[in-house]
Image (cartoon, rainbow, N blue to C red):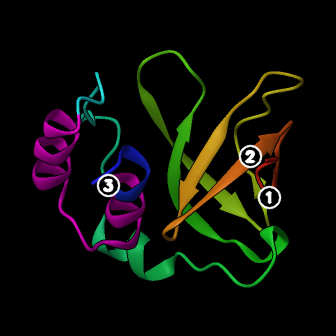
């Protein structure tokens, strides 16, 4: 299983955090999910939805901004609530999908 597949399964609730960490270790990801920072509760999983376009995404996911750890983020109508990456590259895994984060807005990943 790839790192993307593992994170997608975690963000849909299909994989618990300890199981995701074991899978990340086996995949050689070089990082694990911090149980004090990356926990998405059952209520947050239930409240997380993604439609056909990035602007329909709502709920909680994980942001990868290339520093070796992931950050839990809150998204409303395709925009992060407390994060703006400006011109820096970042990705958000949410509701089993991966989006690129442009400033505070989710977009389909390029390429």
Q: CA distance from mark 3 to mark 2?
A: 17 Å
| Residue 40 seen anywhere in this rendered image of the structure | no
Residue 57 image position (x, y, % from top left):
70, 72
User: Image height check: is 55 above or below 108?
Assistant: below
Q: Nearer the viewer, residue 46 or 89?
A: 89
Q: Secondary structure at mark 2?
A: strand
Q: Earlier in the sequence, mark 3 or mark 2?
A: 3
Residue 31 image position (x, y, % from top left):
29, 25
Residue at 79% x, 47% y is: 111
Q: Is residue 17 magenta?
A: yes
Q: Earlier in the sequence, mark 1 or mark 2?
A: 2
In the image, taking residue 12 as reference, residue 55 lies left or right, namely: right
Q: Which residue is mark 3?
A: 6
Q: Which residue is mark 2?
A: 100
In the image, taking residue 27 as reference, residue 88 lies left or right, namely: right
Question: Which quarter of the picture shows residue 64?
Answer: top right
User: Image height check: is 68 above or below 44?
Assistant: above
Packing grade of label 3 (10 A; few <14, some 14-19, many >=20) is: many
Residue 22 image position (x, y, % from top left):
10, 43
Residue 47 image position (x, y, % from top left):
50, 79
Residues drawn in magenta: 6-27
Packing grade of label 2 (10 A; few <14, some 14-19, many >=20) is: many
Residue at 20% x, 51% y is: 20
């Amino acid at each position: 299983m790839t790192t993307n597949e593992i994170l997608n399964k975690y963000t849909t609730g299909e994989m618990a955090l300890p199981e995701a960490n074991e899978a990340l270790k086996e995949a050689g990801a070089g990082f694990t999910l911090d149980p004090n920072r990356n926990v998405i509760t059952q209520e947050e999983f239930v409240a997380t939805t993604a439609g056909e376009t990035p602007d329909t995404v709502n709920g909680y996911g994980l942001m990868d901004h290339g520093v070796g750890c992931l950050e839990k983020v809150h998204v409303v109508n395709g925009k992060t609530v407390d994060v703006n990456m400006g011109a820096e590259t970042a990705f958000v895994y949410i509701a089993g999908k991966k989006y690129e984060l442009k400033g505070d807005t989710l977009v389909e990943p390029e390429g």
